[in-house]
Image: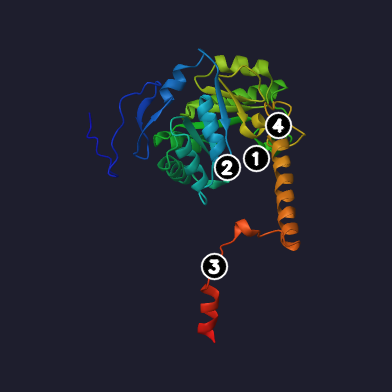
C-alpha cells in the first residue's frame, strides 16, 4: 500500500466503521468514508433501486444523510463554491455528485478543470449536461461523470420546450442513442428526465450506466427528487412528477408571520415605554451618579 501521507497532514480512517462505510481517498487527495463508491453503485444495478436528492442547504443535507439517503447531487458554482463545500462537509459520508452548469465549460479542457475543481472540494463525481466529447475528456482524466438526457431544461429548445421527451419513435430512439453515446464516452451514470416510464425500463436493461430517474417513473436504478419537492419548500403549482412529503412552506410562512408580530410588539413596547423595563437594565450603585456629576462640575 502507498504511504498514508497526504500532503495536508491527513490521517486515513479505518477501513470501515460499524455503519458499513468504506474508506476512500477523493480525487482531490483527501481521506474520508463513504456509503458508496462508484464501483458500489454500479454493482447495485439491477439489484435494488437507490434513492437520491439534491439539497439546497446545509440543514437539508444533514437531514438527508441522517435519514439514510443513498446519494446526493449538489449544485456547484465555481465562482461561489462555498455552499457546495459546506454541504459536502455537512454530509461527509454520503456519495455526492456536484452538478456543474452547462455553460461553465466551453472546451473539453475547461470541463476537466471544472471537474477537478469540484473533486478538490470533496465531490465523488460530477453531474453535467455536456456533450459526449466533454464527458470523454473528463472521464479520461479520472473524473466520474453522470450525464443528462431526456428533458434537459437548458437544452429544451431542441426538444420543443419544457415538456416530456420520448413519446414518438424518433425521440425514443434519440434518448437511447444519447445514453449509449454517454456510455461510450466513459460516464458511469445518467440522469433521465421526464420520459415515458416504459421506455426507461427497456433502456435501463440495455445500458451499463446507472439510470437516475426524475419524472421518468420507476424503471431506473436510482429514484431522484429535489429536496424542495420532498419537503414542500415552495407553494403550488408542483411538477407533475413530484410528491410533497411535508409542507414546510406553510411552516415557514407561519414563522414569517411570527417574525413580523415580534417586531411589531417590540416597536409598540418601546413607543409605549414598556421596554426596557427594570429587569432589562443595570442600576448604578448608590452614590455613583452623584460622584460622577461632582467630577464633571
Q: Can you name the residue that lies furthest to the top here?
A: 47
Which x, y percent locates residue 216? 66, 22
- Front residue of 100/20: it is 20
Question: Mark 4 and 3 residues: CB-CB less than 8 Å, in contact?
Answer: no
Task: Say which label, 2 or 1, has the lower sequence index.
Answer: 2
Front label number (4 vs 2):
4
Question: Mark 2 and 1 residues: CB-CB less than 8 Å, in contact?
Answer: yes
Q: Locate residue 41 relative to residue 255 in the image: left or right.
A: left
Task: Say which label, 3 or 2, has the lower sequence index.
Answer: 2
Label 1, label 3: how many angstroms apart (C-alpha)? Answer: 66 Å
Residue occupied by mark 1: 154
Which x, y percent locates residue 44? 47, 17
Front label number (4 vs 3):
3
Q: Quadrant of the N terminus?
A: top left
Residue occupied by mark 2: 102
Label 3 neighbour load within 10 Å: few <14, some 14-19, many 20+: few
Task: Say which label, 4 or 1, has the lower sequence index.
Answer: 1
Amino acid at each position: 500500500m502507498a504511504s498514508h501521507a497526504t500532503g495536508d497532514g491527513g490521517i486515513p480512517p479505518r477501513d470501515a466503521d460499524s455503519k458499513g462505510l468504506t474508506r476512500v481517498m477523493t480525487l482531490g487527495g483527501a481521506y474520508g468514508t463513504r456509503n458508496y463508491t462508484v464501483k458500489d453503485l454500479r454493482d447495485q444495478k439491477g439489484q435494488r433501486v437507490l434513492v437520491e436528492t439534491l439539497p439546497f442547504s446545509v440543514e437539508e443535507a444533514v437531514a438527508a444523510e441522517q435519514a439514510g439517503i443513498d446519494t446526493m447531487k449538489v449544485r456547484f458554482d465555481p465562482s461561489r463554491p462555498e455552499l457546495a463545500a459546506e454541504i459536502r462537509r455537512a454530509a461527509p459520508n454520503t456519495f455526492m455528485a456536484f452538478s456543474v452548469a452547462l455553460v461553465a465549460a466551453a472546451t473539453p479542457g475547461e470541463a476537466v478543470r471544472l471537474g477537478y475543481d469540484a473533486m478538490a472540494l470533496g465531490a465523488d463525481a460530477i453531474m453535467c449536461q455536456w456533450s459526449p466529447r466533454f464527458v470523454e475528456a473528463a472521464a479520461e482524466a479520472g473524473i466520474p461523470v453522470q450525464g443528462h438526457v431526456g428533458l434537459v431544461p437548458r437544452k429544451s429548445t431542441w426538444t420543443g420546450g419544457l415538456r416530456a421527451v420520448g413519446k414518438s419513435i424518433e425521440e425514443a430512439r434519440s434518448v437511447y442513442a444519447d445514453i449509449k453515446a454517454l456510455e461510450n464516452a466513459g460516464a458511469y451514470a445518467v440522469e433521465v428526465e421526464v420520459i415515458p416510464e416504459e421506455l426507461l425500463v427497456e433502456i435501463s436493461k440495455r445500458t451499463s450506466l446507472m439510470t437516475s430517474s426524475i419524472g421518468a417513473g420507476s424503471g431506473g436504478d436510482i429514484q431522484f427528487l429535489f429536496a424542495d419537492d420532498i419537503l414542500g419548500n415552495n407553494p403550488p403549482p408542483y411538477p407533475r412528477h413530484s410528491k410533497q412529503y411535508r409542507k414546510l412552506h406553510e411552516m415557514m410562512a407561519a414563522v414569517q408571520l411570527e417574525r413580523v408580530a415580534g417586531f411589531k410588539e417590540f416597536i409598540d413596547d418601546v413607543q409605549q415605554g414598556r421596554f426596557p423595563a427594570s429587569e432589562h437594565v443595570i442600576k448604578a450603585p448608590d452614590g455613583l451618579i452623584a460622584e460622577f456629576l461632582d467630577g464633571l462640575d
